[in-house]
């Protein structure tokens, strides 16, 4: 038997865009077939996009997705590509009652029956086989038990004489699932020749190794190579980082696609199972990984929401500078509108830094002083204290939204995770207003690191560093009062971010924080700020979500909660 | 054996407020014991409040909840009430691995083990027994499979010689669950004498009958009376309507608590099982039911978020008039701040109607013209078209938020469901800005009905109707342009609301809508408006959620989605 050429199609789908996703499948299959591949594997829920949440429960959407799968199969056959086996993901049919009492549960709002999270095999102009995901994750960002019924059988298809088993994402994260079943030999005494895994595995820092370790365990379990195909690109508040890979039967990486970009990874499954090495993309530096995840998230959000440009306030500070730089990297500097909105408290150097930044990025730069509008409100309302500070911030928000309405830009928010978590941002202000906050998952300490990394990268390439040095080095300030700096009301950011990490990411309590050796005053200060900010944010649901874990692993907390970490 | 006096304590808990909830339990137990009750049953998750969402995953919260249960038991004993059996709900202990691969799943963000949704029996100063909910709903507003592990055993406790079985909410919605197990006789040949069900069953229109029908089936199944205790009060975007009841062994209602208010329903379980009738509260008229649900939702949101007053814009239109009236009914007219914010396009009669309404309600009435602030923006920015319309609406939002900051009111939004669903509200404007929108689940046709019902109720009581007649009768208009009315851009509301109901509530597609006989032009118009509004709202996550089904049964849709109902 000859080697079987396999293509891993790492594509950037869009939720609900059946036509666009079908076009991606056709284009990549043509490319794979031209390269001699007999088998092309796409990521989880290719045609529908992922995650589709409650769209799964709309029958007209499911019907359209099924028509799209049939159309793709027919189109490939019409082009003479029917002999190429295409494995892709979509939504399955409904009609899968889950548990007893379905009719009663429907009366209480539960759908009577649920569709599945399905992989299909297209060949010879038709949908030839299907596999329904067994293990439905329902934790962190995942809500699949809500919308899908689990599959119960395994699917092995023959491609060019090889037995290819199919699994979907969470299936390989659980012991004793469908992979264990496929590890047993068939009636003729044959095992698997390849395990193909379709994934929609969201980015988290350092997750790459967890994926390869798990997949290696499955490779050894089925005693066959594993082709792990991951989704790529930003989708809502998630980022999929790609990095698809092939492991040999011993679990060693023999081919790997790059991360954060689309790719077609082609690899030959040899006759004897002794897997040859394909291209292996290098690992990324930690700062580059996070920076590119932010850029991918923003690029996806802008494009998939139908925008071509963004607008944001430029204060001269580090957060808006880094956000604007990420935007320029995502969609080009000429598609970034930076608006300086000085108040009477804004320093000259802030305005200079904002102008300097915009020039370096090639951004469209505007200056819109807010003093006249603030004065108009103050003539009528005579606000002081926090109400006055918030007024300035909100007038900036109205200016940005007006520019967005007039010119069609997406307004983006520069708020970082430390600031959002501690409530150091005004509800409906220019720091938190907007459709997307690229730094929502990046704490302030990391903001400085990423700015330095980005500037160093430019220097290495002989380019002008995008971020003005003084934006990086000056003490952070919201400039809502004369002489105000963040450290007037917050602990130093390096310490703050350590406590935030333990309290938010790891859900530790005060007792655990003290046991780590943090100063009790600092702990109480941070816990109080976070609880208060969380409470305020939930009272006014608008405003960017603060995700409890990196990149969209949002804890869905109740809006009203009186629970406060006990402070003794 | 003497009759067993049972008390159903229908209380209004608050999520996370362990101290406050414990105080409710103590107060109601004292009252029940004074009335001679030997058994007091509270609603689901009494001590923690319900639903706690991801608070369940915070260990320090679980520890505090357990301490609270022990404290309540000790306090009751210290007061000489240790002999009264108290059944209440709380969060169970963690340490319940769900499925294999727990360690690997933790690496992907899944908690290693999960707590339970628990009922405990307090007696003689201690937690004497515990029952863990078997069936964890994970549809509609429920996300329990995400945060809880299911229980696996049944719990029957003896109280004054009677065998009392315990179940929690969803347990009775499923066939073949713990109730079926408890229907079998014990070793001594005894069945249950009473089934006590702790519930957190959110309000939906007409749901009362579904509950009694289901509970009646369980009564016949165990051949014993059922005491169904429901939570009451607004919690976040849910409303719990109370209406706790007792059924005899044949499934007939023999006692019922009123709805939307706290209550202690006392009833005697007779020796022979021939259940006597207790107090049976009358059913409510459909409009009264919906009106009171809105008021309960708002009252709970205000109080549980620590506010004592609300502020809203009064336009003279029906939506803000009804919203202000609900607010006055919820927290008293003197705690309502109504702000008239006329623009150059506002009619005189609008301002008169707003002032008239405020006077009838006894509300704090302010007039804050927006022309000077709008002019200040326009001098700088020269906006026109939609950008100009939105500017007016957003300036109103800034005025309201400034008043809120200065004086501490919660800003509430008057947007109704039809308007929010079709996008007839501006992002960040006075109609959609705010922490809570009491009419979010009420379509426009119903808005008029509720206004009429409320005025008629006043007339019946010999009071002045709160809502000016002209606010009810005049054609609805946003007054953002001269002569503008809603029907310039929308189908008539009665037709619109019918299509919205089918398209949103029932998730029907275009084909199903046409099959119902709706005009294709109307269908396409409405579908396009809803899809566009949904898309816009998701681009800018701020703004009130539009719930797909009544009272918070939110469909959790992806933010970015290109799916549009195909229009041929």
Image (cartoon, coloured by chain):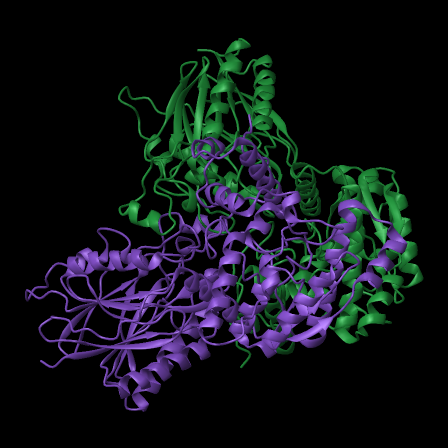
Chain colours: A green, B purple
Q: In the image, what residue occupies the spot 61% across and 65% down?
A: B412
**Quarter occupied by residue B180:** bottom left
Residue A498's place in the image compared with B77, above or below, is: above
Confirm whether residue A279 shows in the render.
Answer: no
Q: In the image, what residue occupies the spot 27% across and 71% down?
A: B280
Looking at the picture, tell me which residue is in the foreground, A219 or A35.
Answer: A35
Find residue B274 and report its horizontal and vertical position in percent. 11, 70
B565 horizontally vs A395: left or right = left
Find residue A455 and report its horizontal and vertical position in percent. 82, 46
Confirm whether residue A363 shows in the render.
Answer: yes
Find residue A163 and report its horizontal and vertical position in percent. 39, 21
Residue A422's place in the image compared with A329, above or below, is: below
Quadrant of the drawing holding the C terminus of chain B: top right
Q: In the image, what residue occupies the spot 55% across and 73% down?
A: B328
B62 horizontally vs A368: left or right = left
Looking at the picture, tell me which residue is in the foreground, B515 or A188.
Answer: B515
A451 horizontally vs B32: left or right = right
């Amino acid at each position: 038997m000859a080697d079987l050429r396999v293509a891993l199609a790492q594509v950037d789908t869009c939720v609900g865009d059946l036509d666009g996703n079908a076009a991606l499948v056709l284009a990549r299959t043509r490319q794979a077939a031209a390269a001699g591949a007999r088998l092309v594997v796409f990521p989880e829920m290719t045609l529908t996009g992922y995650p589709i949440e409650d769209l799964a429960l709309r029958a007209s959407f499911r019907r359209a997705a099924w028509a799209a799968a049939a159309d793709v199969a027919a189109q490939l056959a019409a082009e003479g590509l029917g002999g190429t086996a295409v494995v892709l993901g979509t939504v399955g049919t409904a009609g899968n009652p889950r548990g007893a009492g379905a009719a009663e549960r429907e009366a209480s709002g539960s759908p009577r029956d649920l569709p599945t999270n399905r992989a299909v095999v297209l060949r010879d102009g038709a949908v030839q086989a299907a596999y329904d995901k067994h293990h439905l994750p329902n934790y962190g960002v995942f809500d699949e038990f809500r919308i899908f019924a689990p599959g119960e059988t395994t699917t092995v298809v023959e491609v060019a004489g090889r037995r290819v088993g199919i699994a979907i994402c969470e299936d390989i994260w659980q012991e004793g699932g469908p992979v264990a079943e496929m590890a047993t030999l068939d009636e003729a005494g044959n095992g698997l020749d390849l395990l193909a895994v379709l994934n929609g595995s969201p980015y988290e820092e350092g997750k790459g190794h967890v994926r390869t370790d798990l997949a290696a365990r499955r490779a050894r379990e089925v005693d066959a190579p594993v082709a792990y195909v991951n989704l790529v690109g930003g989708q809502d508040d998630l980022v999929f980082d790609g990095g698809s890979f092939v492991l040999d039967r011993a679990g060693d990486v023999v081919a790997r696609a790059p991360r954060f970009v689309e790719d077609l990874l082609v690899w030959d499954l040899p006759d004897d199972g002794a897997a040859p090495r394909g291209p292996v993309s290098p690992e990324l530096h930690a700062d580059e990984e996070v920076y590119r995840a932010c850029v991918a998230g923003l690029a996806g959000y802008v494009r998939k929401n139908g925008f071509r440009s963004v607008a944001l306030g430029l204060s001269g500070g580090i957060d808006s500078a880094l956000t604007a730089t990420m935007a320029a990297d995502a969609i080009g500097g000429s598609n970034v509108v930076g608006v300086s909105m000085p108040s009477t408290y804004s320093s000259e150097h802030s305005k200079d830094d904002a102008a300097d930044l915009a020039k370096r990025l090639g951004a469209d730069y505007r200056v819109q002083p807010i003093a006249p509008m603030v004065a108009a409100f103050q003539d009528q309302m005579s606000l002081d204290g926090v109400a006055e500070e918030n007024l300035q911030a909100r007038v900036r928000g109205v200016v940005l939204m007006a520019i967005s309405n007039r010119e069609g830009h997406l307004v983006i928010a520069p708020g970082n995770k430390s600031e959002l978590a501690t409530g150091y941002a005004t509800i409906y202000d220019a720091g938190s207003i907007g459709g997307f906050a690229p730094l929502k998952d990046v704490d302030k300490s990391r903001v400085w690191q990423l700015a330095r990394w980005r500037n160093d990268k430019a220097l290495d390439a002989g380019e002008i560093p995008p971020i003005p040095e003084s934006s990086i080095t000056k003490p952070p300030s919201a400039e809502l009062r004369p002489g105000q700096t963040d450290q007037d009301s917050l602990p130093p950011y390096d310490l703050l971010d350590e406590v935030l990490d333990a309290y938010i990411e790891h859900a530790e309590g005060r007792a655990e924080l003290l046991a780590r050796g943090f100063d009790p005053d600092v702990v109480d200060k941070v816990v109080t700020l976070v609880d208060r900010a969380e409470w305020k944010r939930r009272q006014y649901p608008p405003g960017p979500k603060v995700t409890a874990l990196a990149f969209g692993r949002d804890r869905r907390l109740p809006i009203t909660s009186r629970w406060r970490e006990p402070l003794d």
